[in-house]
Image (cartoon, rainbow, N blue to C red):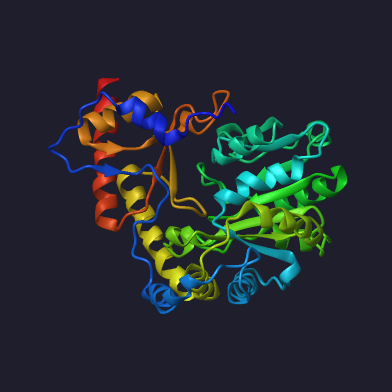
Amino acid sequence: MNFETYPFEKLNQLLENVTPNNDFAPLSLTIGEPQFATPQFILDALCDNASLLNKYPKTAGEAVLREGMLTYLQKRFGLSLDNTQIIPTFGTREVLFNFPQFLLHDAERALMVFPNPFYQIYEGAAKASRGDVVYLNLNKDNGFQPEVDEFMLAEANLVILNSPNNPTSSVMDMEEMKKWVKLALKHEFVLLNDECYADLYLNDPVPSLLNASIEAGNEDFRNILVINSISKRSSAPGLRSGFIAGDAEILKAYMVYRTYVGCASPLPLQEAAAVAWADQEHVEGFRQKYRKNFEIAKEVLGVEAPEATFYIWLEVDDEIDFTVKLYEKYNLKVLPGSFLGREGEGKGYVRLALVYEADKTREALERIAVLNEELKNKG
């Protein structure tokens, strides 16, 4: 399989022969990995259940984990799902990679549709599925919202949305989501929303695609699925806890497939994830940290905060030159947008992940502001 080089490996190659200015402490805004401590009650649950390592976990997930996830969906989105409508997963990266392979295996001509720029696992899944790809280009002209081409969608098997979006931070509203639900029913494609940033809203809570499905009259979620992860909301990426939820008929067959995949989460991790999913209060503490970081970003860089995520999609003249200069002069790493897109999308942007405490965030953004001023004066 001819997989594209991963963005962070591309970044390493780009900066391989660049010597950073060691007058500055190294900082990186490249990876979407929260740098905050995991809440103590989650750590306690992990430690208290360490003795369960002597048991094999079920592929379907333990009852305690499923209950925690269902509680989350009820408290956060007002959704009353049952066990036939959810499957715990080992994070979301694995399900994003193997679900398309399951779904598209018997398709005569597999066609995947997803946003561009994008989380690269979508592309990897398409390649592993030997599927064709059509991009939903996200750019300033369309407000970073996916545009509908019904002629193309009529041929699609799987459409992946990603709202709130990585890397652009755009958010689809309820009416837009309802439109996509109706398209999935009309053209008989599976619609999956990657909702890993849904809890990192800054003001008003953002809806789930499952909410939109109900609003559109599709209460049994036919053709509709969502995935979500504990990594961002609970600052616990090491727990590798996610789920896929929605259409029970699709999930029933996918569960059989997953028994062969062999990626069940260890029991101590399931116990810790269960208490994290069921609790909403600790997430507000993290949202407050991200709100503060975006306040700093507005003060230092003059950029407006998005509705959700912890990313800034920063427009620059030349993202490659900007990334190299920032590392060389100020020992700060950012991710060029062109590494996250295809066919020219992402060019002229860098992605900044505001995942540190406020003091480090300010320090990093002030370095960017200084470089911006230098480039402006030079120009």
The answer to whether 369 is drawn above or below residue 14 in the figure is below
Q: Residue 31 at what x, y percent from top left?
A: 40, 45
**Residue placed at 48% from the left, 68% from the top?**
269
Farthest residue in the left direction? 23
Q: Report if residue 156 is visible in the image.
A: yes
Q: Residue 171 at what x, y percent from top left?
A: 59, 50
**Residue placed at 82% from the left, 57% from the top?**
222
Nearer to us in this view, 163 or 145? 163
Nearer to us in this view, 133 or 102? 102
Residue 75 appears left or right of 326 = right
Q: Residue 224 at what x, y percent from top left?
A: 76, 54
Farthest residue in the right direction? 186
Query: To which quarter of the image does residue 374 belong?
Result: top left
Nearer to us in this view, 55 or 337? 55
Q: Report if residue 171 is visible in the image.
A: no
Nearer to us in this view, 179 or 344? 344
Query: To which quarter of the image does residue 91 belong?
Result: bottom right
**Residue placed at 55% from the left, 63% from the top?**
204
